[in-house]
Image (tube, coloured by chain):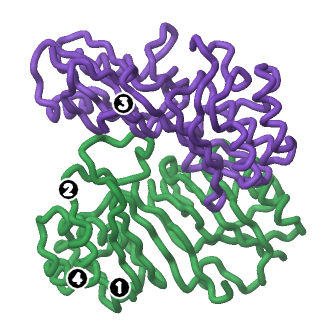
Chain colours: A purple, B green
Amino acid sequence: MTRFALTIEFDGGPFMGLQRQDHGPSVQQAVEDAALAITGEQVILHSAGRTDSGVHALAMRSHFDLEKLFDPFRLMEGLNAKLRPDPVAVTACEVVADDWHARFSCVGRRYRYLIRNRRAPLTLTRGREWLVTRPLDAKAMHRAAQHLVGHHDFTTFRSAHCQAADPVKSLDRLDVRREGEMVIVEADARSFLHHQVRSMVGTLAMVGLGRWREEQVAQALAARDRQQLGHNAPPDGLYFLAAIYPDD
Amino acid sequence: MTRFALTIEFDGGPFMGLQRQDHGPSVQQAVEDAALAITGEQVILHSAGRTDSGVHALAMRSHFDLEKLFDPFRLMEGLNAKLRPDPVAVTACEVVADDWHARFSCVGRRYRYLIRNRRAPLTLTRGREWLVTRPLDAKAMHRAAQHLVGHHDFTTFRSAHCQAADPVKSLDRLDVRREGEMVIVEADARSFLHHQVRSMVGTLAMVGLGRWREEQVAQALAARDRQQLGHNAPPDGLYFLAAIYPDD
C-alpha cells in the first residue's frame, strides 16, 4: 500500500461541497472517480477540511491509498486529465508515510474570505466574492474580530448541522484589512466548526456596516446561542487557503 | 445634451468583443440596450479601447450623450440593474464636458496580461488567464521585451484585420515580472494596434520557453512581417486596465 498526499485547488461553485454527498456532485467524488479511471482502484479521499457548496480551495490537502505503485507526477497528470472539465486541479502529489493523515495529522487550517465593497455588481469575480454594497469600516471589523480570538465556546458561530463533539475551539488569528474596494478576512485555527468562518465574517460585517457595536460581538460569543448570530456570510467569498502539518 | 463618462468592468468571455458586432453579443450593445431601457434614448457608446472576444476590462472608459437630464449616480444604478445578468458593471459615472471624448481625448492605454505558469489546469481562473505548462523564464522575457519599447513599425505584431492607418506606434513600457506561479506582463502606450499586446506576449513567451533567443524579438520587429510573429497569445489573459486623459 502506498499513500499519496495531494494538494487540490477547486472552484466550489458547481459542487455540493468537498465531501461526498448523496444528492449531488462533490469534489471528493470527482477525484475518486478520476483515480479509479487512472488506477483501476476504488480509493477513499480524506481531506484536511470540509467545505460547503460554493466554497473554494486554493490548496486543500488530501490523501488516498493505492495498492499498485505509481509515479506521483504521472499520477497527478493522469488525475488532472480525467478531472476535465470539472474545475478541480491537483497542483501537487507526493508519496507520504502510511501514518500521515490529511485530516488527523493536520494541526492548522487557514481560510480567507473576500468581500468586495462597492455599489456595482460583480463581473469577473461573480461566485468568488461576497458583494457588500454599503460602506464597511474594515478597521472596526478588525477590532471587533479580536473579541473572537482565543479559546472560546463558539456555539453562536456554529451551524445547527455541525457534527463536532465540542463547540470549544481556539481561534489563533482573525485579521480584517482593506485593499482598495476589497475587505479581506483571514482566519487561523487548529480546526473550525461548521460555518464558523462564514458566521464570524457575517457578524463582523454587521459591525462594519455600523449596525452592531464592536462589543456586541463579544456579547454574541458569550451568549453561546445561534440565535444571537449577526449574519451568516455566503459561501462565494470563502477559500480554504492552507493546511499545516507538524513536519512542514 | 449631456455627456456622461462611464468606467466599465466586464468579463469578455460571453461577448464577441467590446464594440458592436453583427454576428453576436457585444458589451457596447449590452450598455446601449440598458441605456435605452433606462432613459428611452438610443445612445451610441464610444470607448477608449477596442477589445476582442474573450478580452476583459477592469476599467474601460466610455461615454454617451443624453438629451434628458439624469443624475449620474442614479443613471449608474439603473444601468447596472438593467445589465444583469450580463457580466458588465458600470463602476463610475460622471458628467463631462461636451468635447471630452472617451476615445479621441485618451492619451494613454494600459493593458495587463496574466499567464499562469504551472502543470495543473486552471480552475477558479479559467477563461481569465493563459495557462503555460512549461517553465517560463520571466527575466529573459523582460529583457527581450525591452527590444519592443520605443517608436517602431509594429507590423509584425499587428493583426491582418487591423484597421489603423499607420503601423508605427510608441510603446512606452513593456514589463514582465513573476509572482509565484504567475507571469504578469504590463504594457503602456498612447495607442495599440489590433492584437498588438497578445502578439507581443505570445512572442515573449517563445523567449521564456527558451525556443527563441532574446535578439530574435528585435529581428522579428525589424522584419515588419506578420509571418515572423512567434505566437499570438489567447485573449483569456488580457485585461484593459486603464485609460489616461490629459485632465486626470
The quadrant of the picture occupied by the N terminus of chain B is bottom right
Q: Residue at x 11, y 15 (%)?
A: A68
Marks 1/4 same chain: yes
The circle on residue B167 is 1
Label 2 CA crowd tier, 10 Å (few <14, some 14–19, many 20+): some
Amino acid tagged 1:
Pro
**Circle 4 sits in a helix, a strand or a loop, which is it?**
helix
| A195 relative to A110 in the view: left or right | right
The circle on residue B135 is 2
The circle on residue B221 is 4
The chain carrying label 4 is B
Q: Position of residue B158 (x, y in %)?
A: 32, 74
Q: Residue at x 22, y 82 (%)?
A: B221
Alpha carbon distance from label 4 to label 2: 25 Å
Foreground: disc 3 or disc 4: 3
Alpha carbon distance from label 2 to label 3: 24 Å
